Amino acid sequence: MKTQLEGDRILAGKEAVAELYKTGYFGRPREDGLELSLVEAAYLQSRGKIEIELEGKKLDFRAFFEQASLRQPNFELKYIVYKDLKERGYYVQPSAADFRVYPRGSHPGKSAAKIFVHVLSERQPLPVKLLQDSVISAENVHKQFILAVVDEESDLTFYEIKTAAPQGEMSEPYPSVKTDATFLEDRVIAWDAETSGALYARGFYGKMLDPERLQLSLVESLFLFSRKVIVVRDRKGKVFSFDEFVEKASEIESSFLRKYCAYKALRDSGHVVKTGFKFGTHFRVYRKVESIEKIPHSEYLVNVIPSDYEFRLPVLSGAVRLANSVRKRMLFAVEKGEEVEYLDIGRVKM
């Protein structure tokens, strides 16, 4: 079947509607025939289903592939992903997100597409704002958002990305008495034995220095300070204000306030939040801890990122792979003023 390359589309005659669209749902019917995308055309040409001409000259697969790569950014990446999805048995159509994919056993006209697929090279940066907008757009029309990453050897990794609103099950064990604590080099110690014991045993705050005294991280300390559970002093006895504490902590850790906003949001939603250092993340998060003697596995690993952050896909891949390997979900907490929004990212098999 002869077709014509025009711009970034392939045009076929009316016979193509019956032969290609009605049997395989390739392209989009038009009054005068069928319009194919470049990746659809390359796939069909590779299988001997169509011939492609440009200005009266027949193009072999190499010539067409080179032309298509000149006419469409990321063409070769999109072709690799399209071909893979087709060979897995999916019906796939081009869309604004790159591709829309229909459930197995279904096709255009029988049911709606289930998945939006966006394609990137492992070398391309991914702005978090663009990712959030894409995910929300997909969720608004009840679609699953999949990021297909093509590595330098043309292997594919698929990630499901969705918004999240995690909810914990902890009630906060605030003691009725306010206690003193001291800001040392880069942590805080609470001195009262009863308060220290209650915070540690019932809220899993900090780590006991000894049976009577509790070591607290900076984010834990500011959270308890904001709840009027502790009064924080410097080593000379001067009481910190909230802003003074933030200023001092930010001198120690430049991203302190961003981390605190995420910590506060997670605690306020009923979670226990601990450092994620051993996992290479900011926090590990538990839905509920009933006993310090029997601590469950954490549910999430959380990285806190600014709103102008750009993902580097090899780094993203490492974080998600680690989280999945220890049976946790990987959440990215994106700053939004004094609040955060969450992206849940996990590897999936298509």
Image (cartoon, rainbow, N blue to C red):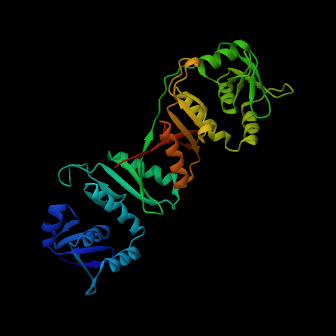
Which corner quadrant holds the N terminus? bottom left
In the rendered view, would you say 46 is above or below 286? below
Specify whether 178 is left or right of 34.
right
In the rendered view, would you say 192 is above or below 240? above
- Is residue 150 in view? yes
Residue 212 percent location from the top left of the image: 74, 15
In the rendered view, would you say 27 is above or below 111? below
Q: Give the quarter of the image for residue 24.
A: bottom left
Residue 219 percent location from the top left of the image: 66, 32
Specify whether 245 is left or right of 3.
right
Q: Which residue is more in the foreground, 280 or 14?
A: 280
Q: Which residue is more in the foreground, 286 or 230?
A: 286
Which residue is located at x 52 percent, y 30 percent? 298
Residue 48 percent location from the top left of the image: 22, 73
Q: Give the quarter of the image for residue 16.
A: bottom left
Which residue is located at x 18 percent, y 54 percent? 109
In the rendered view, would you say 291 is above or below 345? above
Specify whether 172 is left or right of 17.
right
Which residue is located at x 59 percent, y 17 percent? 202
Which residue is located at x 72 percent, y 41 percent? 250
Q: Residue furthest right?
A: 236
- Is residue 173 in view? no
Residue 121 percent location from the top left of the image: 47, 61
